[in-house]
Amino acid sequence: MFGLKTSKISLFSDTKKLEKDIDEFVNILSEVGLAFKSIVRTYLTHSKNGNFDEMVEKVTEMESKADTITKEIEHALYEETLIPDARSDVLRLLEHLDELIGMYQGNCYHFSIQKPNFPEEFHEDLIGLTETVVSCVESLCLTVRSFFRDTKSVRDNAHKVTYFEKESDIKFSSLARRIFNSDLNLDQKMHLRYFVEKIDRICDQAEDIADELIIYSIKRSV
Amino acid sequence: MELTILLFLLGGLFLGWSLGANDAANVFGTAVGTRMVNFRTAAIICSIFVILGAVISGAGTTETLGKLGAINALPGAFACCVAAGFSVYLMTKFGLPVSTTQAIVGAIIGWNIFTGSSIDFGVLTTIFATWIICPILAGLISIGIYIGLKKFIASSKIHLLRLDAYTRTALLLAGAFGAYSLGANNIANVMGVFVNISPFTDINVSNFFIITSVQQLFLIGGLAIAVGVFTYSKKVMFTVGNDLLKLSPLSAFVIVLSHSIVLFLFASQGISSFLTSLNLPAIPLVPVSSSQAIVGGVIGIGFLKGGKEVKWSVAGKISVGWVVLPIITMIIAMFILYILTYIFNLNVVF
């Protein structure tokens, strides 16, 4: 009997810890996005400033923290056989969110290593694209939180993700067109297009995750 | 206690084991099938509460079975129990959730026919009627609880993980309640036929309370059920929890709860007397089928979800089992009674 009582207490404390871990994981995703926005701005305006490298390093730390949390959640869900009906959905979700954090980090690294030369005329567009991408992921964070607490709101929040993804596509096309219409050399045009495309892909991934979340929430509601 | 009496009681214990292996599996079937509760935890809780239910509240339904056929000779009781236990064991082998109630009623009818005793058709009709009412009632209760719970969860915005923890705890509590109700309602099937011929005497514990001979009988019956739960119930648990309808943990809880409520209603002398005191028709204290209550609950949830996901072939197989079981048991009981009477020269009736 006492064994059962202890396991009940442990179940509730494990649950609270897991809830906290998931919240923290989503916070990291949101914070990495905000950091990315600052990194792009800092890169474009003060590319030689040491602050940029510090910020990239911080994103790397956040990414590795997110990895640790994902593993902890994964182990806890399996070891405690929690949420048996939604476990695979939650694990796939976390994996895809982790990939999203990885995409942010990858972008930061590529800026840091390849140092693309964006002429000033493209700065505003690139910042605009980055802001849309970050807003898209912010909406995804809300969708993720609502999946865990309020499935009815998932569709509304996911709709915002789709909206920002479309915005991002428009901004990407416009910027890419401007880059290729410019007088830059083809190699530089290709190089800049690579960066713009990589940033836009974050939104595509966010939209895919939002679509998955709609399906998961339907599964939970039936 | 004489050796022959012990030998005959073994028939009842065999039936108790079958009940544990099959009927008791219903109580935690949905919880184990959905992997919300592991088998060992389910088996421990189920065993404890089945025994408590049998000893504390088992008397009510026993009277009804006694009325159907007052088996007054140990060999007769032995034959009925072995027949019922064997037929339930056969069904358990196929993973079919059947009812020990149906088996024992079939066996008692077999005894009545064999011995030429009169069958109380009034009681028989009441029992048959509850077999129809029980799954329908369980289905309706589960639909009502499910709708209410869904609304509550949607408005309370509980975190998925916390909801999981609550559901797990609720499943354990509802399972414990179900096991208690099962013990109270179904112990009559296992030990009811031995009540009139109980070999035990009352035990006075320090002038504090008395353990009656019937309670002692029910205690060993309860222990036999517990052994059945531990040794053989896993397969039926997965049939109930997985094969009929893919259940969510929440549906699993709703089904166990509605099953437990139905079993409790048909076993509670308190509720029955309360209704009588209000000049309302009393609930007949009949050993109903836990399998029927569970399957009724599962199909109720299935209907609520449109009915498409219910595996009707499995439901049909289970229903055929329910019809065939009492008939098979009746035939087996008559066969055993024949052997005991004409080969072993034992009196199966006084």
Image (cartoon, rainbow, N blue to C red):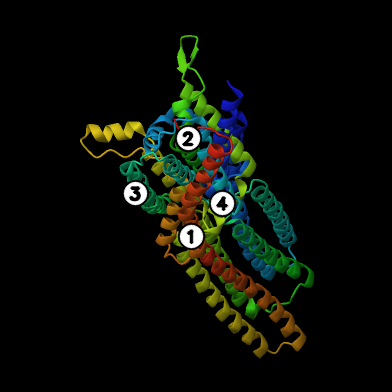
Instruction: Say if B192 sits above or below A218 in the image.
Output: above
- N-terminal of the pair, mark 3 or mark 2, is 3
Q: Is residue B94 above or below residue B287?
A: below
Q: Earlier in the sequence, mark 2 or mark 1?
A: 2
N-terminal of the pair, mark 3 or mark 1, is: 3
Q: Is residue B166 visible?
A: no
Indicate which disc residue B315 carries.
1
* Residue type, label 2: Ile
Question: Quick one: label 4 or label 3, which is nearer the N terminus?
Answer: 4
Location of residue A106 by image quarter? bottom right
| Mark number displayed over residue B129 | 3
Crowdedness near tag 2: few (<14), some (14–19) or many (≥20) residues, C-alpha within 10 Å: many
Q: Position of residue B170 (x, y in %)?
A: 49, 42
Rendered location of residue A31, percent (x, y): 61, 57
Q: Is residue B205 above or below residue A78?
A: above
Residue type for callout 3 = Ala
The local crowd at label 1, few if under 14, some if 14 to 19, many if 20 or more residues have their Cα within 10 Å, is some
Chain letter, disc 1 residue: B
Q: CA distance from mark 4 to mark 3?
A: 23 Å
Is A92 on the left or on the right of B289, as rendered? right
Mark 2 sits on what residue?
Answer: B187
Q: Are marks 2 and 4 on the same chain?
A: yes
Q: Which residue is mark 4?
A: B91
Write down the chain letter for disc 2.
Answer: B
Callout 3: SS = helix
